[in-house]
Image: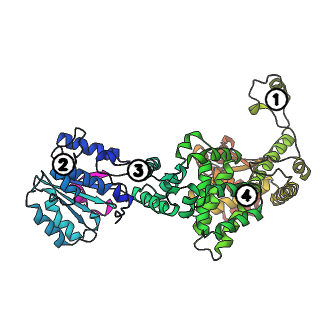
Amino acid sequence: MSEQYIVSARKYRPQTFDTVVGQEHITTTLKNAIRTGHIAHAYLFCGPRGVGKTTCARILARTINCENPTPEMEACGQCPTCLSFQDNASFSVFELDAASNNSVDDIRALTEQVRYAPQIGKYKVYIIDEVHMLSSGAFNAFLKTLEEPPSYAIFILATTEKHKILPTILSRCQIFDFKRIQTEDIVGHLAGICVKEHTEAETAALHVMAQKSEGCMRDALSMMDRIAGFTGGHITYAQTVEHLNILDADVYFKLTDIILSKDIAAALILADEVLQKGFEGDIMLNGYAEHFRDLLLCKDGSMAKLLDVPEEHKRIYFEKAQIISTPYILAALNMLNEAALSYRNALNKRLHLELCLMKLCYLNDVLDLTHLPVAEEASKKKAVNLDTAPPKPQQQEILHTVDQNPSNNRQEIQAPPIVEVTAQAHISEAPTKPAGSTGKAKIGKDLYQAVLAAHSREQAEEEQKSLSQEVVEMLFAQFIETMRKQEQLSIATNLAQMKILFEAPDLISLHCVSSINYHFAIHQKDALLEFFVKETGHKELRLTSAVDDSIKRAESEKKYKTKSELYQEMVEQNPVLKTLKDGLNLQLE
């Protein structure tokens, strides 16, 4: 009769602290506590599944009861206590699954056992797995025993969801947080087991298993058992990728080359081949996004340590990363992420995937279009500035001096050449070739952009109002009336005291009667300028403000006229008023 088969997760379960993988910060602390005799009465082991919580609890229970521990504080494995523990016959260690024993009665039965001292060994150890599953009543029944147990009782609680445990329980325990096991540690452990099992395995295949397990050693061991049975003891990378239903990185490298060459037909054919193998579209989208993320990491040496791929693929990733520009990678990542998020709600999922690939094929052209308007606007501003404000003789002398001294800062002083923004200029200029483009001329695209730019300029010029003193005063009065309608009377009153002048085609000024009046002008400057720009279309318009004493004197003179002076002004406007005064014999004083 053949020997009973035992899965690797049970057969190679660690029996000592030194054999625990990836949790050195936990095992070192526990061994030091045993060495110094500082053993707590309650421990809480929390962390993701398959990282060694229950395993460390069992090792701790076995070690503290060992009669002859080693100098490294490991169980000897030879004493009666260790042997009974190995045979699952120890009366000093009790394991309770809180997922199925979560009632008050179960906890009461446990607390009854705590009263009796251990028959063998120094401590009675109670390991409660998935402790967060206990009911609220069971937690409350457990509180007093957990806080003040007998000197020989030790509780080790394990959970994957620490946030579900009552704070009163957490405060009574020493908490140990287990971390996910690193990919390199899992690969090394799997390789060691393969040697013991006389199984041949490629390192790249083990790396894929470690990545797929997401830091869970138990899942990695289960995958290795399945694939070893599938391959007959010879584990290869291709078979591992096929068995785990993972798209090979070579598919993404091939797809990237196709997309950069703008071959839509080849991209759709490759997507069809992937779908024919049974892969869903969201798997391809998420995997391709991860592929671009790895390419982005290869752009900077400081991020290269985050690259988690087999060694055989790292060189290819670094080579491909130098071909593709960073803006393209970021835009592709954003596009793939949006496509993956909306994939579930798509009515035609195949078309959703294909549309994303087609957009990626022409993503470089989209990036080109986003940069063209910026260059056109810059050229336009340069041409307008040079036409309206030619350099003075002193500036020409400075420019000539700079040309003779290349060491000077040319970017700050050197004048740009006079250019005229026309369709012909855009056709003759060759745009910068982005990474991954085919280098074909884009005359139609540039001409279209030039026409759009010219049309936009003409439309903007038509919308601009011609400014004059009358127009400025009218708009200023409208702004003051707007302030009154908004019940900002103090602002409207102060603005009404100011005088607005049309100084130049791009300059208007506010003349204030006092410092208080000037204070209001400063605070309303931005709002007034925005109003003028909106009404006139002059985006280059400027607004200045200053205190004008002449206005103040005029206002003072106008304000403090005598009654006789006012009467004379009224008579000049209406002579009949003097006849009325004399006929009625009226006096001014």
Left or right of 544, for residue 11: left
Left or right for 178, reference 122: right
Which residue is tagged 1?
395
Q: Quadrant of residue 47?
A: bottom left
Mark 1 or mark 4: whose residue is earlier in sequence? 4
Name the residue beneath numbered marker 3.
196
Asked whether residue 588 appears in the rendered view, the answer is no
| In this rendering, the label closer to the viewer, 4 or 3 | 3
Q: Residues within 10 Å of mark 4 (few under 14, many from 20)?
A: many
**Quadrant (top left/top right/bottom left/bottom right) for the N terminus:** bottom left
**Sequence-wise, which precedes: disc 4 or disc 3?**
3
Q: Which residue is under mark 4?
A: 259
Give the magenta range: 162-178
Q: Residue at x 29, y 46 (%)?
A: 17
Q: Amino acid at mark 1?
A: Gln
Is residue 175 inside the magenta stretch?
A: yes
**CA distance separating discs 4 and 3:** 45 Å
Are circles 3 and 1 on residues that touch, CB within 8 Å?
no
Tag 3's secondary structure?
helix
Q: Cα distance, mark 4 to mark 2?
A: 62 Å
- The Cα–Cα distance between marks 1 and 4, rounded to whole angstroms, is 51 Å
Circle 3: residue type: Lys
Q: Position of residue 281 (x, y in %)?
A: 62, 68
Crowding at mark 3 (Cα within 10 Å: few <14, some 14-19, many 20+): few
Mark 3 or mark 1, which has the lower sequence index?
A: 3
Circle 2 residue: 64
> Who is closer to the viewer here, 295 or 244?
244
At which x and y percent is residue 450?
85, 55
Residue at the far right in the pictured view? 424
At x 31%, y 64%, the residue is 164
Between 332 and 66, the one nearer to me in the picture: 66
